[in-house]
Image: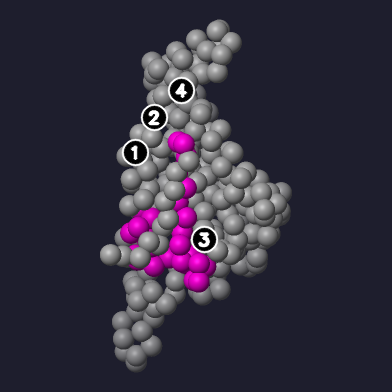
Amino acid sequence: MSESLVLVSQAGAVQTLTLNRPNALNSFTTELHAQLLAALDAAAADSSVRCVVLTGAGRGFCAGQDLADPVVAPDTTPGAPSKDLGDVVERFYRPLCLRLRSMPVPVIAAVNGVAAGAGASIALGCDLVLAARSASFIQAFARIGLLPDSGGTWLLPRLVGRANALGLALLGDKLSAEEAQRMGLIWRCVEDEALASEAQALAQRLASMPTKALVTTRAAMDAALDMDWPTALAQEAELQRRLGHANDYREGVLAFTQKRAPQFSDR
């Protein structure tokens, strides 16, 4: 049986996925990719799950790709062919990034330590990012002759603007969690000892909300980034039409008029 590289726990409607390679700062291997994607697929298929928290074991969130993994480690033998890193991105990182963005429930990244390279991109690809004050974000790609992947070239300029995105990507400097919040890269920086409880409280809050409306909002905002104003307005009308036919809208209005807490069930 494979080692559990992704630990799964659940509290109510919140499922927590913990990357579990602490001695390697939870860096990615082919097996970690397989287990994380399988865990996300399982959460997506489980109707009892209404929010997912992604975090790391030990002192790091994720240090990106494990460069010792045979799939990426260069062969130093004279005349040996180079590794096809594009194939690695297509086979492993692209499916993971697409899965995160298509989850039928909100996903929170609870960044408990360093998030570097692809680890930073994966965190930023989640819906909301909470980071411990001691955590940091590093666009480490340029240090080894690469460019940001796992959605980094798409995410960074949209989150912090072209000037900041290029500064982060070209220089590869460590960015503190506090500065990441100030820059708009993440949602919130919290004290280290409060990260787990803050992430759970936020996740429980999201789990009690109208899930379908939340994920539709995520999809609409992502799509609107490449739309003009009239097209975005048309998209809003169509998506509002769909949500208006759903149970959660009726329940939300009824709860409001009856002055009680709503019980949302759509997913």
Residue at image position (44%, 48%) is 9
Residue that label 4 marks: 264
Secondary structure beneath label 2: loop
Residue that label 2 marks: 267
Residue at image position (40%, 17%) is 247
Q: Residues within 10 Å of mark 4 (few under 14, many from 20)?
A: some
Mark 4 / mark 3, whichever is N-terminal: 3
Q: Per the image, is 130 magenta?
A: no
Q: Residues within 10 Å of mark 3 (few under 14, many from 20)?
A: many
Spot occupied by residue 233 in the image (x, y as percentages of width and height): 49, 24
Q: CA distance from mark 3 to mark 2?
A: 29 Å
Amino acid carrying label 2: it is Arg
**Taking 111 as reference, is 122 left or right?**
left
Q: CA distance from mark 2 to mark 4?
A: 9 Å
Amino acid carrying label 4: it is Phe
Res. 96 mark = none
